[in-house]
Amino acid sequence: MIYRARTPQTGYGRPIGIILLEEHIPCPPGTPGNPTTFSHPVCYEVASGVGTQDLRRANPGGLESFIAAGRRLVERGAWAIAGNCGLMVVHQEALARALPVPILLSSLLQIPLIARMLGPDAAIGVIASDKNSLSEDHLRLARAGSNARIVLASMDGRPFFTAAVGEEKGELDFDGVTAEVVDVARTLVAANPEVKALLFECVDLPPYAHATQAAVGLPIFDMITLIEHFRSALVRNPFIGVY
């Protein structure tokens, strides 16, 4: 085996790079911002000066910071770049044009694939952090021309989640948020029996996927499933078995 240095790469063995926003939100295991979420190394860069509000606007801001962060990740050895907010879908196409590696900025990119796996009368239940932040423009970008049926729910009015994520108070009550996410999912599924899969738009929701799935019995997709799916294609391992 011969190992060779790559220019301008400064690190090795971390195929997934993740762009973070400037936020003050705890990242428990299960969130992309916590490296122990993954079974493989990841590396991070912050999109300087960019917060969630910049991604909600009709003309979203922060693209230059995203490109700069993405370039730093490529120089550090990332073979693919992921995001840390579902609303980053607004910069998906621009980053894919600007950078030489695959880009997967938002869990919403899975919508066309999920829709194709479900029957024609089925719908995808999308749970967002805030119903006012995830606009029809975000969903149009995510659908990518598909006819995916979406039923939207949000964590609005849930005090534990709002304090930690919406208001960025710096403290997160894990048990309290778990109960809130499960309740939102149960309410969504009960009111919409056509929902056959759930998708967490918000990257702060994957830590509660296990409890939510136990409650509703449906497939649950999120930013972690997207990253792990892509990594399984990016880093293939030899098959070992009996013949």
Image (spheres, grey):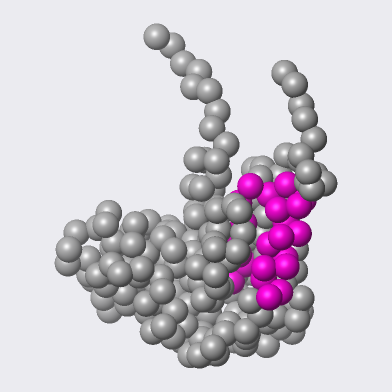
Residue 150 drawn at (x, y percent): 31, 74
Q: Is residue 153 visible?
A: no
Q: Quadrant of residue 206?
A: bottom right
Residue 177 drawn at (x, y percent): 58, 74
Residue in the foreground of this view, choosing between 158 and 13: 13
74 part of magenta stretch: yes
Magenta residues span 64-86
Q: Is residue 82 left or right of residue 199?
A: right
Viewport quadrant of the C terminus: top left
Residue in the foreground of this view, choosing between 28 and 54: 54
Residue found 68% across the figure and 75% down from its top: 64
Which residue occupies the extreme left position in the image?
Answer: 121
Q: Is residue 17 left or right of residue 218?
A: right
Residue 47 drawn at (x, y percent): 72, 72
Viewport quadrant of the N terminus: top right
Residue found 46% across the figure and 16% down from its top: 241
Residue found 51% across the figure and 48% down from its top: 230
Up-down relation of residue 39 to residue 36 (above or below)? above
Q: Is residue 213 left or right of residue 227?
A: left
147 part of magenta stretch: no
Residue 193 drawn at (x, y percent): 23, 71
Up-down relation of residue 222 to residue 61 (above or below)? above
Residue in the foreground of this view, choosing between 148 and 76: 76
Residue in the foreground of this view, choosing between 170 and 76: 76
Q: Is residue 122 left or right of residue 72?
A: left
Up-down relation of residue 232 to residue 24 (above or below)? above
Residue found 41% across the figure and 60% down from its top: 110
Total marks drawn? 0
Which residue occupies the extreme right position in the image?
Answer: 10
Q: Is residue 117 visible?
A: yes
